[in-house]
Amino acid sequence: MAAVLALTAVGLSLVFGVMRVVNVAHGEFFMLGAVTAWFVATHVPGPPWAGFLAALVICPLVVGAVAAAADMAVLKRLNYDPEATIVATIGLLYILQQTALTVYGPEARPVPAPFAWSIRLPWFGWSGYKLAVIAAAAAILLGVWLLLTRTRAGLVMRATQVDRETARAFGIDTDRVYAGVFALGAALAAMAAVLIVPIQQAHYLMGHDPLLLSFVVVIIGGLGSLRGTLVAALVIGLSDGVISVFFSPTLAKILATLFVAGVLVFRPQGLFGARA
Amino acid sequence: MTGAATGAGGVGGRDLALHLAVLAALLALQFVLPAYHHTNLARIMVLAVFAMGYNIAFGYTGLLSLGHALFFAAGLYATGLGIVHGSLAPGIAAVAGLLAGGAAAAAVGLLALRTAGVSFMIVTLMFAQAGFLVVLYFGGWTRGDEGFVLQGAQRLVFGLDLSQPGPRYGAALALFAAAVLVNLVLVRSRFGRVMLAMRENAERARMLGYDPFAVKLVALAVSGLYAGAAGAAYALLFGYVGASFASIQYSILPLLYVLLGGAGVVLGPFLGALVMFYLIDLSSSLTSAHLMVVGAALLALVLFAPQGILGTLRARLLPWLA
Amino acid sequence: MTLPKLIQPTRRGVLGGLAAGGALALSPARFASAQSAAPIRLGFQLHRTGIGAAYGRWYERTTQAAVKVLNEAGGINGRPVEVIFEDDGTDPRRGAEVVEKLATRSGCDVIFGALFSHVVIGSAPRAGELKIPYLVCSEGFHVASGMLNRWTLQPGITDVRAQVSSMAPWVTANLGRKVTMLFPDYAFGHDHRDYFSAAVAAQGGEVLELVAIPPTETSFTRYFPRIPRATEVLYHVMVGPAVLTFVKELGEFYGSGGRPQIFGFVDSLEAVDTASPGLEFLEGTHFWEGHCRVKQADAGEHEAFYRAAVGVDDNGASVTDARDVSTYAHMFSCWETLFVIRDAMAAAGYQGPADRQRFVEAVEAITAMAHSREHVQGDKLFNGRTHQVFGHQFISRVDGGRLTRVHTTAIEDGLYPDAVDYTSMSF
């Protein structure tokens, strides 16, 4: 699931890169996207693909709006102080989780895939939907890439990242940029979640795993580097499977975790470390 | 947390008197508290010791770690496994727990202190996660997430049965008192002022001739000793050892306690643990949405009292507080 | 959570019982004869939040229904019963604190209801110190293995060791002798691994491969290639929110082509609709069930009564929302445990906390429970020395997306030598 991982991680990386804050609630935005997808998919009439497409549009908007509101109501007032932001996003994490539990309930609920066909090899099955997810994720990532490198909005974001004060002096409303980036990061996580719910059901505690994984990816790729994040997501998504062939899966996870720590200690710029 | 008052100035008798008064009050309280609060307070004191260790790293030295669950778990498991599989006497096992916490912190520090800021947070988080997985991996000994129980006879220290309320409270208070006094001595010592200097301006401290790496390493190791002691105490006082104590949640808890009570204040962690415990306890009686209350409290805290309860008090009213 | 102390509990809105079962109810309540009409307070340690929340919800509903039935039948020793639910967040530390709170603050007479084994093991020491009976509904082997204490009992549900041991003969005789096991890599999964492997070996079968899956896993595809081609029976058990993913990915792996026989614990599908999209491949596979989710053709009067009281339809889903599937294979344990409490309190002449020790002795003295409204899952044998109950287990096959029972084990199939004698321990 490297593709979905990449989407989530890019969202986190973007937020960290531009705003220099660590969003602990990032995984909850992912969860929120999945849960909203369930609501949308069950309330939009018609065939599964209609509900799914609606979810793909509505969920990122909803989640992005929540994130923007959180940014303006809380993070802005903290002046994006790194430590205070962590505490605030932990608070946000609890609130989002509880809201999901109260409104949505504790069950894991599936969203039907928009289509169902699979590719058969004699001993192995691949669901066509999973391939479609990879394609969709790639397309979205390409879109983000273009947005950042080819548009004025991207320019503004990069300018803010490099030097907030100067950007402000040039008449850029950095508050709006920050809110926008925070919302975009959350929306990316939500999109990833919509793509994944037909495979892995929506559940109110589902944000934990993608958060840790995204952390890992962002670090290996170099903090704030989008290109690095992408490469790292692919490498980790694939290598996870490879390592666990040789070791017991728990041991593989231990090694992977220590590896991440090692990268940060010895190669803080990331393994693929060109700074974006 | 921007520029909390350092509290280094004004070393007064008032300060010592306040801490002794708190300890005396805790000593007296055990005779009047109803059973429910009696056990809770013992538990809170143990958790407060853990958070005080965190405060030494974070509040005084400025090291924001997300891996303290590892040090707590090191103490917990060294004690628990030492008793069950190593046939250690409980008293000895508790010392092993204390040392294990310190050793784990020193080992992590040797690597993690090569980084700073966000990287430091994540490196410590990763080490703690690896520790958690190690507990699961050796499920044959640790019983993994299910954990294991220390039976009554395995909790006798110097003839005191720590499963009984009186000795339990006494042991928790003794540990807590020792932790408070050591903490006071530490922050008033020369080394304590160097720690503060590291937090405020590492570059300047370096120019004054202190090695930041060594200072931070010692601070982290002391912090680990506190966490290890708390873990060992938890195993002996409450008789349960399980993997949930190694999970990321237990890295975040001490951070919350410290921020709530006041970073860089000796009694901050205790107050934070106390308030947090009763906040959850009361809100879970009133509503099933108690996580919401906790989340809202955190947001309110960080917005309106970023220095925590005692930090804000110190800034406004009690400049002499250590 | 202080409930109003009503002398006549039949209209107790707080407990929110479901009226459907009331029509069938036993004689109306009369509590006049009791020396004290103050209610008996039972503490329920509930997984309302955290990883166990899907189970907790149904445990709460089942218990509320059972309390309603119990009170309408006259309560306990002529006194009404009230249950105080307290959330433990499915966390062992909070679990111990909840035991403390229920015992010393809410003044409960006994505590019951915990499901997840780490919560049970984390809480039992405190219950033992407080000397309050602690009745768990957890199916873990932790009670009968002897690691807990005299105050901890499991009279409502058979433990994992007995469950898997009693399944093995049928599996090897009907599905195949070469078994590959997929199980979560922690204590609960290890019980499956150890005792099912042993039972298969005892039947002359062979376990080809043990595939342990870390509990934090959310995607499983990469574990399936480790299943040997020679496998005749694939045995799977998973818990947690990722279970549906697990089963779906297993389906993708095998597709519609040839597959081994598949035998799973319904834990892999608790609170999940067996007719969900992506689960078509389960057709013709087998499941263990502690209690048949789909109402079977031969279900009797007790089963109908229980379903109506709890508010579960014939498919095992909520009567108000067909998509809200229950944790049917486990939640009967709350119901049955409550009636064990009643019977033991009656036998002990229970009046108040001073009689707690007599209560435990009364539970220990129970030997058999007959299939009845109180014991809806079926007959049971109780072993007072190991504090563990043993009942029938069911093997069901998925036919047309519904679970149909094909085999019922004998209670004797699951018995094993005692690992502990709690009655020889002091209180």
Image: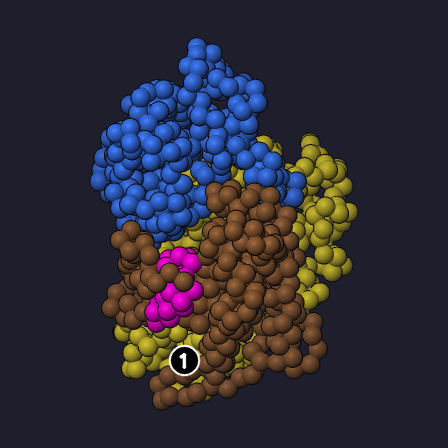
- Please state, as top left, top right, bottom left or bottom right, where the C terminus of chain A lies in the image: bottom left
Q: Relative to A196, is C21 above or below?
A: above
- Please state, as top left, top right, bottom left or bottom right, where the N terminus of chain A lies in the image: bottom left
**Residue A220 is one of the magenta-drawn residues:** yes
Q: Relative to C37, is A103 above or below?
A: below
The chain drawn in brown is A
Q: Relative to A89, is A122 above or below?
A: below
User: Is residue A189 visible in this depiction of the protein?
Assistant: no
Residue B312 rendering spot, x and y as whole percentages? 55, 27
* Residue at figure coordinates x 60%, y 52% from the top left: A175
Q: Secondary structure at mark 1?
A: helix
Residue C100 rendering spot, x and y as whole percentages? 52, 35
* Residue at figure coordinates x 25%, y 29% from the top left: B209
Give the camera-side residue of B75 and C103.
Answer: B75
Q: Quadrant of residue A52?
A: bottom right
User: Is residue A182 visible in this depiction of the protein?
Assistant: yes
Residue C295 rendering spot, x and y as whole percentages? 61, 71
* Residue at figure coordinates x 41%, y 80% from the top left: C253
Specify the segment rendered in magenta.
A215-238
Apparent side of residue B209 relative to residue C196 in the rendered image (left or right): left
Q: Residue furthest front?
A: A170
Residue B244 rendering spot, x and y as whole percentages? 41, 47
Would you name the residue on which mark 1 appears?
C253
The kind of secondary structure the magenta stretch mainly shows is helix
Chain at numbered mark 1: C
The chain drawn in blue is B
The tally of labels here is: 1
Give the camera-side residue of B207 and B21.
Answer: B207
Chain C colour?
A: yellow
